[in-house]
Structures are given as structure tokens and as C-alpha cells.
């Protein structure tokens, strides 16, 4: 049961003008696909084969770079596609908004914290909103394809929102203007999906 490339839940051009179709197509069909091919090869014949990607990452030997990089890349992008939607943006509601306000004071403070985590990530990496057991939410950033499920990485919570700040996520349209991409990302956040993940993991 090898891992497979998940279908995008929308068309490549659905997130225009915030994320362009060409970027989405290359990101999904080339980058994500390559992580999946490579993680499948890295776990073949090991005791990780047949386990869920979450289980593999939670129990990961961080010195195992092929699984760390490609298993992380598989998980991170699989989450990333689902937390974006053409009908996105705005503010979360209900329990999730309450948890964000409890942690950050206001949604705007959360937005500033999350944006800073993405903007200040040196080189390639991710910004995350995570939830801890009990419902406390926290923002962190991680390098490369690491994520907070991995031992000792980031804030140690469960990711419920992730933003890819690798150049491959924005360079065709935004070139070096990562902050503009981050600002645009807020227009496509699928808060319904983030809230679903929050309710599941809190
Ligand atoms: Fe990416």
C-alpha cells in the first residue's frame, strides 16, 4: 500500500489571483509527486511500510534524512492543499476563533505571528498553526520539510494550518516578495477545514 498523490480538491487555477495556476500545477504534479515517489522508496522493505504517514513521522528517527525530507514533504503538502480553497479567507468562527483569541488576543495578532513565522523562516520551510491536547493553539516555523509531528520539532503540537514558504510555492508569481505571497495566502485559507482539524485534534 504505497502512498499516492492526493487529488487537489479544486482546479489548478482555482486559487487565482492569489496563487497562480502554473505554480499550483508544478507544485502538485512535480514537487509533491516527487516527495511521494521518494518516501515510498525510502520506506520500502522497512517496518515503516504500511503505517500511516502520521505514525511514521511521530516515531521518526530524525537521522533518517530520506524519510524525514520526503515523508515530511508528503505529509506537509497533503495538509497544505486541504487548508486552501477558492472560497477561503476571512476569519474562523466558533471554538477555533475562541482558541486563537485566547492564545493571541486577537485574530490580527495571530495573523501577525503566523506571517512572521513564515517571513522569517530562513531559506525553505513552513509556518504552522498547531493545536495541543486540551485545545491550546500555537504558531511555529520549521525548516525544510520538517513539521511539528516529528520528535523535537517546532512547538510539538498537531498542525491544523500550514503555509509552504519554499520558493517553489510562490516564486513564479511573486519572485522574492515572500511577504506578498503570505498576505495573499490569507485570502485562500480554508477555515472550515482548519476548524475540522482543530475539533479532531484538540
Ligand atoms: Fe512545497
Image (cartoon, rainbow, N blue to C red):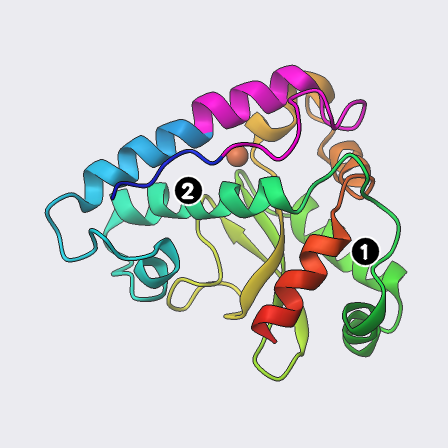
Q: Residues within 10 Å of mark 2 (few under 14, many from 20)?
A: many
Can the viewer see residue 1 in this picture?
A: yes
Depth check, front residue: 88 or 158: 88
- Residue 18 belongs to magenta span: yes
Q: Is 115 located above or below residue 22 in the figure?
A: below
Side (left or right) of 189 relative to 46:
right
In percent of the image, x 57 and y 32: which residue is there? 8
Residue bearing the label numbered 2: 74
| Image location (x, y in percent) of residue 98 | 83, 75
Q: Is 102 located above or below residue 12 in the figure?
A: below
| Image location (x, y in percent) of residue 136 | 67, 78
The secondary structure type at the circle numbered 1 is helix
In percent of the image, x 62 and y 20: which residue is there? 23
| Image location (x, y in percent) of residue 67 | 28, 47
Position of the C terminus, as image quadrant, is bottom right
Label ID, residue 111:
1
Label ID, residue 101:
none
In percent of the image, x 80 and y 35: which residue is there? 184
Q: Which residue sits furthest bottom? A: 134
Side (left or right) of 148 relative to 176:
left
Side (left or right) of 183 relative to 19:
right
Q: Is 180 located above or below residue 125 in the figure?
A: above
Q: Which span of residues is magenta-colored?
A: 7-31
| Image location (x, y in percent) of residue 112 | 81, 56
- Residue 9 belongs to magenta span: yes
Q: Dividing the picture into quarters, in which one does residue 107 lie?
A: bottom right
First of labels 2, 1 by sequence position: 2
Amino acid at each position: 500500500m504505497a502512498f499516492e498523490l492526493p487529488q487537489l480538491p479544486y482546479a489548478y487555477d482555482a486559487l487565482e489571483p492569489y496563487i497562480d495556476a502554473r505554480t499550483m500545477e508544478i507544485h502538485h504534479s512535480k514537487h509533491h509527486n516527487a516527495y511521494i515517489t521518494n518516501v515510498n522508496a525510502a520506506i520500502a522493505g522497512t517496518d515503516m511500510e504500511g503505517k500511516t504517514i502520521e505514525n511514521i513521522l511521530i516515531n521518526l528517527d530524525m537521522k533518517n534524512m530520506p524519510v524525514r525530507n520526503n515523508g515530511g514533504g508528503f505529509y506537509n503538502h497533503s495538509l497544505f492543499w486541504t487548508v486552501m480553497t477558492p472560497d477561503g479567507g476571512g476569519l474562523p468562527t466558533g471554538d477555533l476563533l475562541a482558541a486563537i483569541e485566547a492564545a493571541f488576543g486577537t485574530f490580527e495578532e495571530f495573523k501577525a505571528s503566523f506571517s512572521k513565522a513564515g517571513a522569517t523562516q530562513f531559506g525553505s520551510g513552513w509556518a504552522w498553526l498547531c493545536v495541543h491536547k486540551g485545545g491550546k493553539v500555537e504558531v511555529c516555523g520549521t525548516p525544510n520539510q520538517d513539521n511539528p509531528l516529528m520528535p523535537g520539532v517546532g512547538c510539538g503540537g498537531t498542525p491544523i494550518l500550514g503555509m509552504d514558504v519554499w520558493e517553489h510555492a510562490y516564486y513564479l508569481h511573486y519572485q522574492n516578495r515572500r511577504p506578498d505571497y503570505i498576505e495573499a495566502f490569507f485570502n485562500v485559507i480554508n477555515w472550515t477545514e482548519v476548524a475540522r482539524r482543530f475539533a479532531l485534534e484538540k
